[in-house]
Image (cartoon, rainbow, N blue to C red):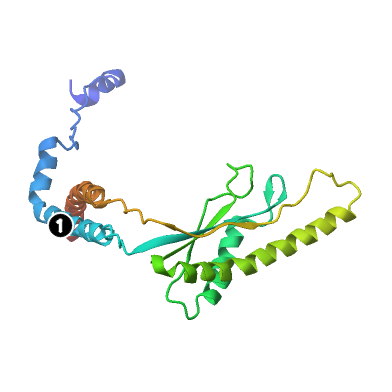
Amino acid sequence: MNKQQLPQDAQFSQPYPPYQYRDDEISLIDLAKILVRRRNWMFATFIAVFSASLLVAWLKRPQPVDNSKVAFTTLFAVGYKTPTVFIEPLSSIKTQLESAFIPVASEGKPFSARVEIENRRNVSEDGNNIVKLITLASLDQKEQVAAYHNAITEPLLARHNQLAELLQEQLMSSAEVSKSIQPLNSSVASSAQPLPLSPQKDKSKLIVAAGIFLASILAIMMAFIREFLGRLRSSLND
């Protein structure tokens, strides 16, 4: 009896040919071979990234402290328009100082001032209402720095006094205003106090260590990327 004469059920009962399974998994040995084969790319990537980290560490190195100069610091206390809100946002004050008052006062002066503030919007956030003006100069220039800081703070103080007067007039004209809400004017807490310069923290070792770690990761990634591109090009050429 040939195959055509077999019953229909007997034909379906014949075993199928064995399935050809192909293992596409990559073993650790294959990965190691890729790293060895692309070692030149790994080395070049590591050197490039590590050299960049050395350059950043050199640029960020702490500068030597000039003992002949001190940091003259003026503290400007920002007033309140309510017990929990400043008379003017600290960010706005910093912008005015840096873009208007300091450039005008610095004309013809051998030094300049920088502004430091805490990131606060109102008094309820830790109650810090101090704006700092800092100028580096020698001790014998204290009077000149004090006059320089006064030239910066005077227009700002006049502006805040004007804002406080306008606010007081609004409170007086309001029938529902509480007597406990009284604006407090801004003031200069201290003027041109000399403070010694604090040495900068040396972060070069941390930058170099981070550069070694990043360079190692990128070097390994570059080896596999180069291997992938090589196989892709070979596949396209076939």
x, y (%) of residue 142? Answer: 45, 66
x, y (%) of residue 100? Answer: 57, 72
Q: Is residue 156 left or right of residue 72?
A: right
30 shown above or below 196: above
**One can see residue 138 in this view:** no
Q: Nearer the viewer, residue 58 or 217?
A: 58
What residue is rendered at 40% in x and 68% in y? 140
Amino acid type, residue under disc 1 in the picture:
Ile
Q: Which residue is mark 1?
A: 47
Quarter the C terminus occupies: bottom left
Task: Residue 51: name its quadrant.
Answer: bottom left
Q: Is residue 83 left or right of residue 16?
A: right
What residue is rendered at 60% in x and 50% in y? 129
x, y (%) of residue 178? Answer: 84, 44
Task: Identify the residue at the far right of this view.
Answer: 175
**One can see residue 17 in this view:** yes
Q: Of helix, strand and loop, which one carries label 1?
A: helix
x, y (%) of residue 18? Answer: 18, 27
7 shown above or below 211: above
133 shown above or below 86: below
Task: Residue 187: name its quadrant.
Answer: bottom right
Q: Residues within 10 Å of mark 1 (few under 14, many from 20)?
A: some
What residue is rendered at 23% in x and 60% in y? 58
